[in-house]
Image: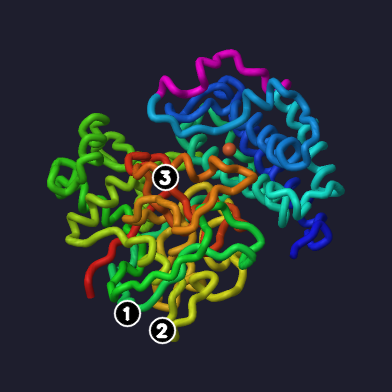
Amino acid sequence: MPTALDLDREALVSWYSRNRRRSETIFDSVRPEAYESRPIPLRNPICFYEGHLPAFSVNTLVKRGLGEGGVDAELETLFERGIDPEDEEAVGGGQSAWPSRIAIRSYAAAADRKVLAALAGADIAAEENPVLAGGLAAYTVLEHEPMHQETLAYMLHRLRYDQKIRPAALAAARIGGEPPVRASAHVPAGHATLGADPGEIPFGWDNEFPSQRVEVGAFDIDVDSVTNRDFLEFVDAGGYEDETLWDEEGWEWRAAREVRHPLFWELHRGVWMWRGMWDLLPLPMAWPAYTSHAEAAAFARWRGRRLPTEAQFHRAAYGTPEGVERAQPWGDAPPDATRGHFDFAAADPVPVGSFPRGSSAWGVRDLVGNGWEWTSTVFAPFPGFEPMPSYPQYSADFFDGNHWVLKGASPATAKELVRRSLRNWFRGNYPYVYAKFRTVGSP
Ligand SMILES: [Fe+2]
Protein backbone atom coordinates (compact mmCIF):
# COMPACT_ATOMS: atom_id res chain seq x y z
CA MET A 1 0.00 0.00 0.00
CA PRO A 2 1.35 3.45 -0.83
CA THR A 3 2.04 5.59 2.19
CA ALA A 4 3.16 9.16 2.60
CA LEU A 5 6.72 7.88 2.67
CA ASP A 6 6.39 6.34 -0.79
CA LEU A 7 5.59 9.70 -2.36
CA ASP A 8 8.57 11.58 -3.64
CA ARG A 9 7.76 14.85 -1.93
CA GLU A 10 10.59 16.69 -3.59
CA ALA A 11 9.25 15.69 -6.99
CA LEU A 12 5.73 16.84 -6.07
CA VAL A 13 7.00 20.18 -4.77
CA SER A 14 9.05 20.79 -7.90
CA TRP A 15 6.14 19.74 -10.15
CA TYR A 16 3.84 22.18 -8.34
CA SER A 17 6.40 24.99 -8.64
CA ARG A 18 6.95 24.23 -12.33
CA ASN A 19 3.19 24.35 -12.90
CA ARG A 20 2.88 27.66 -11.09
CA ARG A 21 5.72 29.27 -13.06
CA ARG A 22 4.15 28.18 -16.35
CA SER A 23 0.77 29.58 -15.30
CA GLU A 24 2.38 32.88 -14.38
CA THR A 25 3.99 33.12 -17.81
CA ILE A 26 0.61 32.51 -19.41
CA PHE A 27 -1.20 35.21 -17.42
CA ASP A 28 1.71 37.63 -17.87
CA SER A 29 1.24 37.38 -21.63
CA VAL A 30 -2.21 39.02 -21.39
CA ARG A 31 -2.27 42.81 -21.58
CA PRO A 32 -3.97 44.36 -18.51
CA GLU A 33 -6.88 45.72 -20.58
CA ALA A 34 -7.74 42.15 -21.68
CA TYR A 35 -7.43 40.57 -18.23
CA GLU A 36 -11.16 40.52 -17.55
CA SER A 37 -12.13 39.73 -21.13
CA ARG A 38 -13.82 36.52 -22.13
CA PRO A 39 -12.25 35.40 -25.43
CA ILE A 40 -14.50 32.32 -25.55
CA PRO A 41 -18.08 33.31 -24.76
CA LEU A 42 -19.02 30.11 -22.91
CA ARG A 43 -16.02 30.27 -20.59
CA ASN A 44 -15.19 32.45 -17.61
CA PRO A 45 -13.07 35.59 -18.08
CA ILE A 46 -9.29 35.16 -18.05
CA CYS A 47 -8.91 36.59 -14.53
CA PHE A 48 -11.14 33.84 -13.11
CA TYR A 49 -8.55 31.21 -13.97
CA GLU A 50 -5.68 32.99 -12.25
CA GLY A 51 -7.71 32.74 -9.05
CA HIS A 52 -9.21 29.35 -9.82
CA LEU A 53 -5.91 27.46 -10.03
CA PRO A 54 -4.61 28.22 -6.52
CA ALA A 55 -8.15 28.16 -5.04
CA PHE A 56 -8.77 24.70 -6.45
CA SER A 57 -5.51 23.47 -4.93
CA VAL A 58 -6.41 24.86 -1.51
CA ASN A 59 -10.00 23.61 -1.69
CA THR A 60 -8.99 20.11 -2.80
CA LEU A 61 -5.81 19.37 -0.90
CA VAL A 62 -5.82 21.62 2.14
CA LYS A 63 -9.51 21.95 3.00
CA ARG A 64 -11.22 18.88 1.58
CA GLY A 65 -8.23 16.56 1.99
CA LEU A 66 -6.41 17.63 5.12
CA GLY A 67 -9.41 19.25 6.79
CA GLU A 68 -7.47 22.43 7.48
CA GLY A 69 -8.58 26.03 7.04
CA GLY A 70 -8.08 27.80 3.72
CA VAL A 71 -6.71 31.22 2.93
CA ASP A 72 -9.79 33.29 2.06
CA ALA A 73 -13.21 31.65 2.20
CA GLU A 74 -14.83 34.27 -0.02
CA LEU A 75 -12.29 33.96 -2.81
CA GLU A 76 -12.24 30.19 -2.51
CA THR A 77 -15.98 30.17 -3.23
CA LEU A 78 -15.75 32.71 -6.05
CA PHE A 79 -12.98 30.82 -7.79
CA GLU A 80 -14.28 27.35 -7.09
CA ARG A 81 -14.96 25.83 -10.47
CA GLY A 82 -14.48 26.23 -14.19
CA ILE A 83 -17.68 25.55 -16.06
CA ASP A 84 -19.02 24.22 -19.33
CA PRO A 85 -22.51 25.72 -19.31
CA GLU A 86 -25.31 25.26 -21.80
CA ASP A 87 -25.68 28.94 -22.57
CA GLU A 88 -24.02 32.28 -22.04
CA GLU A 89 -26.49 33.36 -19.34
CA ALA A 90 -25.30 30.52 -17.08
CA VAL A 91 -21.73 31.82 -16.94
CA GLY A 92 -20.41 33.49 -13.80
CA GLY A 93 -23.70 33.91 -11.95
CA GLY A 94 -23.87 37.60 -12.90
CA GLN A 95 -20.49 38.27 -11.30
CA SER A 96 -19.08 41.44 -12.80
CA ALA A 97 -16.71 43.00 -10.31
CA TRP A 98 -13.73 40.65 -10.19
CA PRO A 99 -10.87 41.26 -7.75
CA SER A 100 -7.90 43.14 -9.20
CA ARG A 101 -4.94 41.20 -10.54
CA ILE A 102 -2.90 42.42 -7.59
CA ALA A 103 -5.49 41.00 -5.17
CA ILE A 104 -5.70 37.72 -7.08
CA ARG A 105 -1.92 37.37 -7.13
CA SER A 106 -1.61 38.11 -3.46
CA TYR A 107 -4.25 35.45 -2.73
CA ALA A 108 -2.33 33.05 -5.01
CA ALA A 109 0.95 33.65 -3.19
CA ALA A 110 -0.65 32.80 0.17
CA ALA A 111 -2.37 29.76 -1.33
CA ASP A 112 0.92 28.54 -2.83
CA ARG A 113 2.62 28.73 0.54
CA LYS A 114 -0.10 26.56 2.09
CA VAL A 115 -0.09 24.01 -0.72
CA LEU A 116 3.70 23.78 -0.83
CA ALA A 117 3.84 23.29 2.92
CA ALA A 118 1.29 20.48 2.62
CA LEU A 119 3.16 18.78 -0.22
CA ALA A 120 6.41 19.05 1.71
CA GLY A 121 5.28 17.94 5.13
CA ALA A 122 1.61 17.07 5.72
CA ASP A 123 0.13 13.58 5.84
CA ILE A 124 -1.06 13.85 2.21
CA ALA A 125 -1.36 10.10 1.57
CA ALA A 126 -3.32 9.07 4.69
CA GLU A 127 -4.80 5.71 3.69
CA GLU A 128 -7.90 6.03 5.89
CA ASN A 129 -8.93 9.19 4.05
CA PRO A 130 -10.32 8.48 0.54
CA VAL A 131 -9.50 12.01 -0.63
CA LEU A 132 -5.84 11.58 0.32
CA ALA A 133 -5.20 7.84 -0.08
CA GLY A 134 -2.34 7.15 -2.47
CA GLY A 135 -1.70 10.88 -2.77
CA LEU A 136 -4.97 11.31 -4.68
CA ALA A 137 -5.68 14.95 -3.80
CA ALA A 138 -2.04 15.93 -4.42
CA TYR A 139 -2.03 14.38 -7.88
CA THR A 140 -5.46 15.85 -8.62
CA VAL A 141 -4.09 19.31 -7.92
CA LEU A 142 -0.89 18.67 -9.89
CA GLU A 143 -2.71 17.48 -13.03
CA HIS A 144 -5.56 19.97 -12.78
CA GLU A 145 -3.25 22.93 -13.34
CA PRO A 146 -1.64 21.84 -16.64
CA MET A 147 -5.06 20.89 -17.98
CA HIS A 148 -6.19 24.47 -17.41
CA GLN A 149 -2.97 25.74 -18.99
CA GLU A 150 -4.05 24.03 -22.18
CA THR A 151 -7.55 25.52 -22.10
CA LEU A 152 -5.97 28.90 -21.33
CA ALA A 153 -3.69 28.52 -24.34
CA TYR A 154 -6.54 28.01 -26.75
CA MET A 155 -8.48 30.76 -25.01
CA LEU A 156 -5.59 33.24 -25.41
CA HIS A 157 -5.32 32.05 -29.01
CA ARG A 158 -8.61 33.89 -29.61
CA LEU A 159 -7.39 37.24 -28.23
CA ARG A 160 -6.44 39.93 -30.72
CA TYR A 161 -2.70 40.21 -31.20
CA ASP A 162 -2.69 43.67 -29.61
CA GLN A 163 -4.21 42.15 -26.44
CA LYS A 164 -1.19 39.88 -25.88
CA ILE A 165 2.46 40.42 -25.06
CA ARG A 166 4.59 38.51 -27.51
CA PRO A 167 7.42 36.48 -25.89
CA ALA A 168 10.82 38.06 -26.42
CA ALA A 169 12.42 34.82 -27.63
CA LEU A 170 9.98 33.23 -30.03
CA ALA A 171 11.22 30.48 -32.35
CA ALA A 172 10.01 30.77 -35.93
CA ALA A 173 7.03 28.55 -36.76
CA ARG A 174 7.92 25.36 -38.64
CA ILE A 175 5.81 25.77 -41.74
CA GLY A 176 7.03 22.90 -43.94
CA GLY A 177 6.22 22.49 -47.60
CA GLU A 178 3.64 20.24 -49.18
CA PRO A 179 2.30 17.46 -46.94
CA PRO A 180 3.41 13.83 -47.39
CA VAL A 181 1.53 11.75 -49.96
CA ARG A 182 -1.62 10.34 -48.43
CA ALA A 183 -1.29 6.74 -47.24
CA SER A 184 -3.12 4.35 -44.98
CA ALA A 185 -1.97 1.59 -42.66
CA HIS A 186 -3.67 -1.77 -42.20
CA VAL A 187 -4.44 -2.78 -38.63
CA PRO A 188 -5.52 -6.43 -38.28
CA ALA A 189 -8.21 -7.57 -35.86
CA GLY A 190 -7.08 -7.77 -32.25
CA HIS A 191 -7.76 -6.40 -28.81
CA ALA A 192 -7.22 -3.00 -27.22
CA THR A 193 -7.07 -2.15 -23.53
CA LEU A 194 -8.77 1.14 -22.73
CA GLY A 195 -8.23 2.83 -19.39
CA ALA A 196 -6.24 1.38 -16.54
CA ASP A 197 -6.75 -0.47 -13.28
CA PRO A 198 -6.31 1.20 -9.90
CA GLY A 199 -2.73 0.67 -8.73
CA GLU A 200 -1.45 0.18 -12.29
CA ILE A 201 -0.54 3.87 -12.63
CA PRO A 202 0.34 6.38 -9.87
CA PHE A 203 -2.66 8.52 -10.75
CA GLY A 204 -5.50 8.65 -13.26
CA TRP A 205 -8.75 10.59 -13.46
CA ASP A 206 -11.89 8.68 -12.52
CA ASN A 207 -13.03 8.16 -16.14
CA GLU A 208 -9.83 6.17 -16.84
CA PHE A 209 -10.87 3.35 -14.46
CA PRO A 210 -11.31 0.43 -14.51
CA SER A 211 -9.59 -0.92 -17.62
CA GLN A 212 -11.66 -2.33 -20.49
CA ARG A 213 -10.52 -4.99 -22.91
CA VAL A 214 -12.20 -4.50 -26.28
CA GLU A 215 -12.03 -6.69 -29.40
CA VAL A 216 -11.49 -4.59 -32.51
CA GLY A 217 -12.08 -5.78 -36.08
CA ALA A 218 -9.56 -5.12 -38.85
CA PHE A 219 -9.54 -1.61 -40.31
CA ASP A 220 -7.30 0.75 -42.19
CA ILE A 221 -6.33 4.17 -40.89
CA ASP A 222 -4.67 7.28 -42.30
CA VAL A 223 -0.92 7.26 -41.61
CA ASP A 224 -1.00 11.04 -41.13
CA SER A 225 -3.68 13.22 -39.66
CA VAL A 226 -5.78 15.23 -42.12
CA THR A 227 -3.85 18.31 -43.22
CA ASN A 228 -4.91 21.80 -44.17
CA ARG A 229 -4.18 20.80 -47.78
CA ASP A 230 -6.64 17.89 -47.49
CA PHE A 231 -9.24 20.02 -45.75
CA LEU A 232 -8.96 22.75 -48.36
CA GLU A 233 -10.16 20.21 -50.94
CA PHE A 234 -13.26 19.63 -48.81
CA VAL A 235 -13.88 23.36 -48.50
CA ASP A 236 -13.37 23.91 -52.25
CA ALA A 237 -15.64 20.98 -53.08
CA GLY A 238 -18.50 22.67 -51.21
CA GLY A 239 -18.37 20.44 -48.13
CA TYR A 240 -19.81 23.21 -45.97
CA GLU A 241 -22.84 23.56 -48.24
CA ASP A 242 -23.72 19.86 -48.50
CA GLU A 243 -26.15 19.02 -45.70
CA THR A 244 -25.96 15.28 -46.43
CA LEU A 245 -22.38 15.19 -45.09
CA TRP A 246 -23.28 16.57 -41.67
CA ASP A 247 -25.04 15.09 -38.69
CA GLU A 248 -28.05 17.00 -37.46
CA GLU A 249 -26.39 18.81 -34.58
CA GLY A 250 -23.36 19.68 -36.71
CA TRP A 251 -25.48 21.07 -39.53
CA GLU A 252 -27.55 23.16 -37.11
CA TRP A 253 -24.35 24.68 -35.69
CA ARG A 254 -22.88 25.22 -39.16
CA ALA A 255 -26.04 26.98 -40.32
CA ALA A 256 -26.67 29.04 -37.16
CA ARG A 257 -23.06 30.31 -36.95
CA GLU A 258 -22.63 30.47 -40.73
CA VAL A 259 -19.49 28.37 -40.39
CA ARG A 260 -17.70 28.05 -43.72
CA HIS A 261 -14.21 26.97 -42.69
CA PRO A 262 -12.26 25.88 -39.58
CA LEU A 263 -12.02 28.52 -36.86
CA PHE A 264 -8.20 28.61 -37.16
CA TRP A 265 -8.52 29.66 -40.82
CA GLU A 266 -9.18 33.23 -41.96
CA LEU A 267 -9.71 34.52 -45.45
CA HIS A 268 -7.77 37.76 -46.04
CA ARG A 269 -8.21 39.34 -49.47
CA GLY A 270 -8.91 35.95 -50.99
CA VAL A 271 -5.91 34.26 -49.36
CA TRP A 272 -6.30 31.58 -46.70
CA MET A 273 -4.39 32.37 -43.53
CA TRP A 274 -3.85 30.46 -40.26
CA ARG A 275 -4.52 32.32 -37.06
CA GLY A 276 -1.43 31.37 -35.04
CA MET A 277 -0.98 32.23 -31.39
CA TRP A 278 1.35 35.13 -32.15
CA ASP A 279 1.14 35.64 -35.93
CA LEU A 280 -1.19 35.34 -38.84
CA LEU A 281 0.47 32.94 -41.31
CA PRO A 282 -0.26 31.93 -44.88
CA LEU A 283 -2.13 28.64 -44.40
CA PRO A 284 0.56 25.98 -43.75
CA MET A 285 -0.60 23.13 -45.99
CA ALA A 286 1.39 20.46 -44.12
CA TRP A 287 -0.06 21.31 -40.72
CA PRO A 288 -2.91 19.25 -39.35
CA ALA A 289 -6.34 20.83 -39.83
CA TYR A 290 -7.70 21.84 -36.42
CA THR A 291 -11.47 21.46 -36.55
CA SER A 292 -14.57 20.76 -34.49
CA HIS A 293 -15.91 17.21 -34.30
CA ALA A 294 -18.77 18.20 -36.60
CA GLU A 295 -16.36 19.37 -39.31
CA ALA A 296 -14.12 16.33 -38.88
CA ALA A 297 -17.05 13.92 -39.18
CA ALA A 298 -18.37 15.74 -42.29
CA PHE A 299 -14.93 15.52 -43.91
CA ALA A 300 -14.69 11.79 -43.14
CA ARG A 301 -18.13 11.19 -44.66
CA TRP A 302 -17.12 13.17 -47.75
CA ARG A 303 -14.15 10.81 -48.13
CA GLY A 304 -16.46 7.80 -47.69
CA ARG A 305 -14.80 7.04 -44.36
CA ARG A 306 -15.38 7.53 -40.65
CA LEU A 307 -13.63 8.87 -37.57
CA PRO A 308 -11.97 6.11 -35.56
CA THR A 309 -13.65 4.83 -32.44
CA GLU A 310 -11.78 5.22 -29.17
CA ALA A 311 -10.92 1.49 -29.36
CA GLN A 312 -9.62 1.82 -32.95
CA PHE A 313 -7.45 4.73 -31.86
CA HIS A 314 -6.02 2.56 -29.08
CA ARG A 315 -5.43 -0.35 -31.42
CA ALA A 316 -3.68 1.91 -33.99
CA ALA A 317 -1.62 3.70 -31.34
CA TYR A 318 -0.71 1.05 -28.79
CA GLY A 319 -1.32 -2.34 -30.44
CA THR A 320 1.46 -4.42 -32.00
CA PRO A 321 1.61 -7.33 -34.49
CA GLU A 322 2.82 -9.49 -31.58
CA GLY A 323 -0.34 -8.75 -29.59
CA VAL A 324 1.49 -6.96 -26.76
CA GLU A 325 0.21 -3.48 -25.99
CA ARG A 326 2.63 -0.62 -25.53
CA ALA A 327 2.50 2.18 -22.99
CA GLN A 328 3.09 4.76 -25.75
CA PRO A 329 2.87 4.44 -29.56
CA TRP A 330 6.68 4.24 -29.79
CA GLY A 331 7.12 1.73 -26.96
CA ASP A 332 7.63 2.04 -23.25
CA ALA A 333 10.09 4.97 -23.19
CA PRO A 334 8.69 8.06 -21.46
CA PRO A 335 7.38 10.92 -23.62
CA ASP A 336 10.05 13.41 -24.61
CA ALA A 337 10.63 16.03 -27.28
CA THR A 338 11.82 13.47 -29.85
CA ARG A 339 8.51 11.53 -29.82
CA GLY A 340 5.92 14.13 -30.59
CA HIS A 341 4.82 17.74 -30.51
CA PHE A 342 3.55 18.25 -26.94
CA ASP A 343 4.65 19.70 -23.57
CA PHE A 344 4.43 23.32 -24.76
CA ALA A 345 7.13 22.74 -27.38
CA ALA A 346 5.54 25.57 -29.40
CA ALA A 347 2.25 27.42 -29.50
CA ASP A 348 1.27 26.20 -32.96
CA PRO A 349 1.45 22.85 -34.77
CA VAL A 350 4.27 21.48 -36.92
CA PRO A 351 4.02 19.65 -40.26
CA VAL A 352 2.43 16.19 -39.98
CA GLY A 353 4.92 13.33 -39.86
CA SER A 354 7.64 15.41 -38.19
CA PHE A 355 8.31 12.75 -35.52
CA PRO A 356 9.24 9.39 -37.03
CA ARG A 357 10.47 8.31 -33.57
CA GLY A 358 6.90 8.63 -32.31
CA SER A 359 5.29 6.28 -34.84
CA SER A 360 3.18 3.35 -33.68
CA ALA A 361 3.95 -0.31 -34.45
CA TRP A 362 1.79 0.00 -37.61
CA GLY A 363 3.70 3.05 -38.83
CA VAL A 364 0.89 5.48 -37.95
CA ARG A 365 2.33 8.90 -37.13
CA ASP A 366 1.58 11.71 -34.68
CA LEU A 367 -1.09 9.79 -32.78
CA VAL A 368 0.20 11.47 -29.64
CA GLY A 369 1.06 15.13 -30.14
CA ASN A 370 0.47 17.97 -32.63
CA GLY A 371 -3.24 18.11 -31.69
CA TRP A 372 -5.77 15.90 -29.90
CA GLU A 373 -7.58 13.47 -32.17
CA TRP A 374 -11.36 13.35 -32.38
CA THR A 375 -12.97 9.91 -32.12
CA SER A 376 -16.49 8.76 -32.98
CA THR A 377 -17.00 7.56 -29.39
CA VAL A 378 -19.40 9.41 -27.12
CA PHE A 379 -17.80 10.18 -23.74
CA ALA A 380 -19.28 7.75 -21.21
CA PRO A 381 -18.10 5.97 -18.08
CA PHE A 382 -16.44 2.57 -18.34
CA PRO A 383 -18.47 -0.16 -16.59
CA GLY A 384 -17.43 -0.05 -12.94
CA PHE A 385 -16.83 3.72 -12.98
CA GLU A 386 -16.76 5.45 -9.62
CA PRO A 387 -16.49 9.23 -9.14
CA MET A 388 -13.15 10.20 -7.61
CA PRO A 389 -13.36 11.31 -3.96
CA SER A 390 -10.97 14.24 -4.54
CA TYR A 391 -13.11 15.73 -7.35
CA PRO A 392 -16.43 13.86 -7.69
CA GLN A 393 -17.83 16.17 -10.40
CA TYR A 394 -14.77 15.88 -12.63
CA SER A 395 -16.28 13.51 -15.20
CA ALA A 396 -19.76 12.75 -13.93
CA ASP A 397 -21.15 16.13 -15.03
CA PHE A 398 -20.19 15.38 -18.64
CA PHE A 399 -21.76 11.96 -19.15
CA ASP A 400 -24.64 13.60 -20.98
CA GLY A 401 -24.26 12.10 -24.43
CA ASN A 402 -23.16 15.48 -25.83
CA HIS A 403 -19.40 15.09 -25.61
CA TRP A 404 -16.98 13.11 -27.78
CA VAL A 405 -13.78 11.40 -26.67
CA LEU A 406 -10.46 12.80 -27.89
CA LYS A 407 -7.18 10.96 -27.54
CA GLY A 408 -3.49 11.82 -27.82
CA ALA A 409 -2.08 15.24 -26.98
CA SER A 410 -1.71 18.74 -28.36
CA PRO A 411 1.27 21.11 -28.39
CA ALA A 412 -0.18 22.56 -25.16
CA THR A 413 -0.52 19.24 -23.32
CA ALA A 414 2.02 18.79 -20.50
CA LYS A 415 4.14 15.67 -20.75
CA GLU A 416 2.80 14.44 -17.40
CA LEU A 417 -0.59 14.02 -19.09
CA VAL A 418 0.76 11.99 -22.00
CA ARG A 419 -0.40 8.53 -20.92
CA ARG A 420 -2.33 5.81 -22.68
CA SER A 421 -5.37 5.82 -20.41
CA LEU A 422 -6.00 9.58 -20.47
CA ARG A 423 -9.29 10.60 -22.10
CA ASN A 424 -10.26 14.10 -23.14
CA TRP A 425 -13.74 15.19 -24.20
CA PHE A 426 -15.52 18.13 -25.80
CA ARG A 427 -18.82 19.00 -27.37
CA GLY A 428 -19.01 18.29 -31.09
CA ASN A 429 -19.49 21.91 -32.05
CA TYR A 430 -16.65 23.30 -29.92
CA PRO A 431 -14.16 24.66 -32.48
CA TYR A 432 -11.54 26.22 -30.16
CA VAL A 433 -9.61 23.11 -29.14
CA TYR A 434 -6.25 22.12 -30.59
CA ALA A 435 -7.90 19.07 -32.16
CA LYS A 436 -7.12 17.31 -35.40
CA PHE A 437 -8.35 14.01 -36.77
CA ARG A 438 -7.72 11.14 -39.15
CA THR A 439 -10.10 8.78 -40.88
CA VAL A 440 -10.61 5.01 -40.95
CA GLY A 441 -12.17 2.64 -43.44
CA SER A 442 -12.80 -1.05 -43.91
CA PRO A 443 -9.75 -2.94 -45.16
FE1 LIG B 1 -10.74 23.60 -12.83
Image coordinates for residue 1, horizontal then vertical, percent: 74, 65
Three-letter amino acid code at disc 3?
A: Phe
**What is the C-alpha distance between the residues marked 1 and 3?**
31 Å
The residue wearing badge 3 is 399
Residue 147: image x %, image y %? 57, 46
Q: Is the residue at mark 1 in contact range of ligand 1, meaning its CB lies under 8 Å from it?
A: no
Between 221 and 386, the one lying in front of the other is 386
Residue under label 2, please give it. 321
Magenta residue span: 88-103
Q: Identify the element where label 2 is drawn.
A: loop
Residue at horizontal 28 percent and vertical 68 percent from the top? 182
At horizontal 75% and vertical 55% (from top left) the residue drawn is 127
Q: Amino acid at mark 1?
A: Pro
Question: Based on the displayed image, in which of its 4 quarters is residue 98 positioned?
Answer: top right
Closer to the chain start, of discs 1 and 3, is 1
Q: Amino acid at mark 2?
A: Pro
Classify mark 3: helix, strand or loop. Answer: loop
- Look at discs 1 and 3 and give the one toward the viewer: 3
Rendered residue at 80%/63% (across/down): 6
The residue sitting at the bottom extreme is 322
Residue 209, label in figure: none
Quadrant of the rendered structure where residue 224 is? bottom left
Left/right placement of residue 153 relative to residue 123 reads left
**Along the line of sight, the residue nearer the viewer: 276 or 252:** 252
Q: Residue furthest front?
A: 128
Q: Is residue 427 above or below residue 285?
A: above
Q: Quadrant of ligand 1?
A: top right
* Dots 2, 3 in contact, CB < 8 A: no
* Contact check, label 2 and label 1, Cβ < 8 Å: yes
Q: Is residue 178 visible?
A: no
